[in-house]
Image: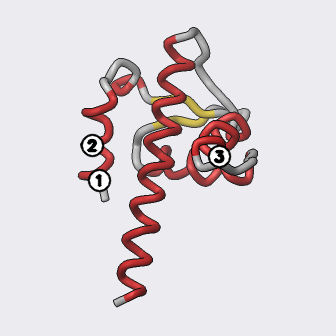
Amino acid sequence: FNNGVNNMNNMVRKKQKMYHALEYMQKLHNQGREYISPTEVGRHVGEIYGIIAHSSYGSPICKNLVNEGYAERDSSGKYQIIERLRNVDFLTLRIDLRQSS
């Protein structure tokens, strides 16, 4: 039973990190920034969880976003939110992330 609960908690935490990263990517995109580094994502999401983080924290989040179809990666290893999500309100995005589990 505990293993199932831990797996569920890990999935929820993963989706929450993805949500925070996408929200950040959208904000930066709206400010004129397109691609951002995993380090920037790691620092931003880590700050939300009260930890000092960098690319080793942000890279798995970014890769998950690409695997789920929410972000794309350029040839230099930076990421951006996909076009269809650039102007989505984040209540809609949160619901979309929940349904993709």
Q: Which residue is mark 1?
A: 100
Q: In front: 71, or 6?
A: 6
Q: In front: 1, or 64?
A: 1
Residue 12: image quadrant is bottom left
Q: Residue furthest bottom?
A: 1
Could you tell me how far apart the alpha carbons at marks 2 and 1 are, in whole angstroms?
6 Å
Residue 50: x percent and y percent? 65, 48
Q: Residue at x 61, y 54 (%)?
A: 60
- Tell me the SS state at disc 1: loop
Mark seen at residue 46: 3
Could you tell me how far apart the alpha carbons at marks 3 and 1 are, in whole angstroms?
23 Å
Query: On the picture, is 28 further left or further right than 23?
Result: right
Q: Residues within 10 Å of mark 3 (few under 14, many from 20)?
A: some
Give the amino acid at mark 2. Answer: Asp
Residue 31: x percent and y percent? 56, 10
Q: Which is more foreground, mark 3 or mark 1?
A: 3
Could you tell me how far apart the alpha carbons at marks 3 and 2 are, in whole angstroms?
23 Å
Mark seen at residue 96: 2
Residue 101: x percent and y percent? 31, 59
Q: Residue at x 59, y 49 (%)?
A: 49
Give the amino acid at mark 1. Answer: Ser
Q: Residue furthest front?
A: 50
